[in-house]
Image (cartoon, rainbow, N blue to C red):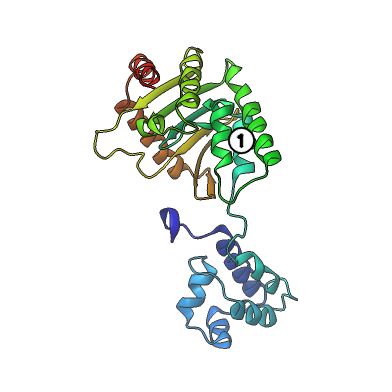
């Protein structure tokens, strides 16, 4: 099972419904198992959400317990999600967050990108996008960046050196990008640190992630890879990623050292 071996909530809910209907109909687990031609432990696992309830069990339980189609109707919700992106939910959470902490492995964080850098990224995306779509995405990213000017919102960024040495859009675009990083770092609510290469293994090698804190002190972690994204609020998961971010900040250059490092890179172009 993925992510801390926790079964999908749809499995657990559907299994609970089977158990509830079975209890109301005074049907034992053994009777349901025999009717569905499953062993008792298999039915128990499905009822507890540790295994995905099968259509056969739903059909048998529905008929045996007189659920009138309610259990069978759950079958479509047990299939894998077709929409594997949580970007809209992430953007909504980001828009109201009081604290944003992000680690980037190969790209400059979206909230710190220049329009030229963003446009260069959007232009080479596969599958290709129309120019109209590219410009709309560039404008939307620029709009998101307006939150940086809200002095009561805290932003912490750790950027791996490789992201700064990847010449997205070419030398001139990167010069402008370095200038923007230096300017953003002058804001009292924005903290930027560079994680240099050559340290061996570090806790961000698994990929980029963003930690968000809502006005109600709710904690979220967002990850994205190859078009598949996740927005997670599970306490243990968030805690783990927060610890990783803390370690990344400790391993990174200080803010002042990071400014000098970025300035040096800009002079080399």
Vertical order, 168 against 11 (above or below): above
Vertical order, 230 against 8 (above or below): above
Q: Residues within 10 Å of mark 1 (few under 14, many from 20)?
A: some
Q: Going by the image, does 101 lie left or right of 70?
A: left
The residue where tag 1 is placed is 93
Q: Going by the image, does 115 lie left or right of 160?
A: right
Across and down, in percent, residue 112 comes to 52, 26
Location of the N terminus (image quadrant): bottom left
Element marked by disc 1: helix
Of 104 and 267, nearer the camera is 267
Across and down, in percent, residue 139 comes to 67, 30
Q: Quadrant of residue 94?
A: top right
Of 144 and 142, nearer the camera is 142
Q: Going by the image, does 1 lie left or right of 99?
A: left
Q: Residue at x 26, y 40 (%)?
A: 201
Vertical order, 84 against 49 (above or below): above
Across and down, in percent, residue 171 comes to 45, 26
Q: Quadrant of residue 161?
A: top left
Location of the C terminus (image quadrant): top left
Q: Residue at x 44, y 58 (%)?
A: 2
List the single residue furthest toward the right.
Answer: 68
Vertical order, 234 against 246 (above or below): below
Q: Quadrant of residue 123?
A: top right
Q: Residue at x 53, y 87 (%)?
A: 37
Query: Across the whole image, how many numbered discs are drawn on residues?
Result: 1
Across and down, in percent, residue 233 comes to 53, 43
């Amino acid at each position: 099972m993925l992510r801390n071996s926790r079964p999908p909530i749809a499995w657990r809910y559907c299994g609970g419904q089977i158990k509830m209907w079975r209890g109301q109909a005074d049907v034992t687990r053994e009777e349901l198992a025999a009717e569905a031609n499953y062993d008792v432990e298999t039915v128990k696992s499905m009822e507890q959400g540790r295994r995905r309830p099968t259509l056969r069990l739903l059909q048998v339980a529905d008929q045996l317990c007189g659920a009138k189609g309610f259990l069978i109707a759950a079958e479509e919700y047990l299939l894998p999600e077709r929409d594997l992106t949580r970007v809209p939910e992430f953007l909504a959470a980001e828009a109201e967050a009081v604290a944003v902490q992000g680690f980037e492995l190969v790209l400059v964080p979206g909230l710190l990108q220049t329009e030229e850098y963003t446009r260069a990224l959007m232009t080479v995306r596969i599958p290709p996008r129309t120019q109209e779509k590219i410009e709309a995405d560039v404008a939307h990213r620029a709009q998101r960046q307006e939150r940086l000017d809200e002095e009561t919102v805290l932003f912490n960024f750790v950027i791996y050196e490789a992201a700064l040495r990847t010449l997205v859009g070419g030398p001139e675009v990167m010069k402008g990008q370095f200038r923007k990083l230096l300017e953003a770092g002058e804001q009292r609510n924005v903290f930027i640190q560079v994680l240099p290469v050559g340290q061996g293994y570090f806790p961000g090698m698994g990929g980029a992630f963003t930690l968000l804190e809502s006005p109600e002190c709710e904690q979220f972690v967002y990850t994205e890879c190859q078009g598949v994204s996740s927005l997670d609020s599970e306490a243990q998961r968030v805690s783990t990623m927060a610890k990783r971010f803390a370690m990344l900040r400790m391993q990174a250059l200080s803010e002042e050292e990071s400014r000098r490092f970025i300035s040096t890179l800009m002079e080399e172009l």
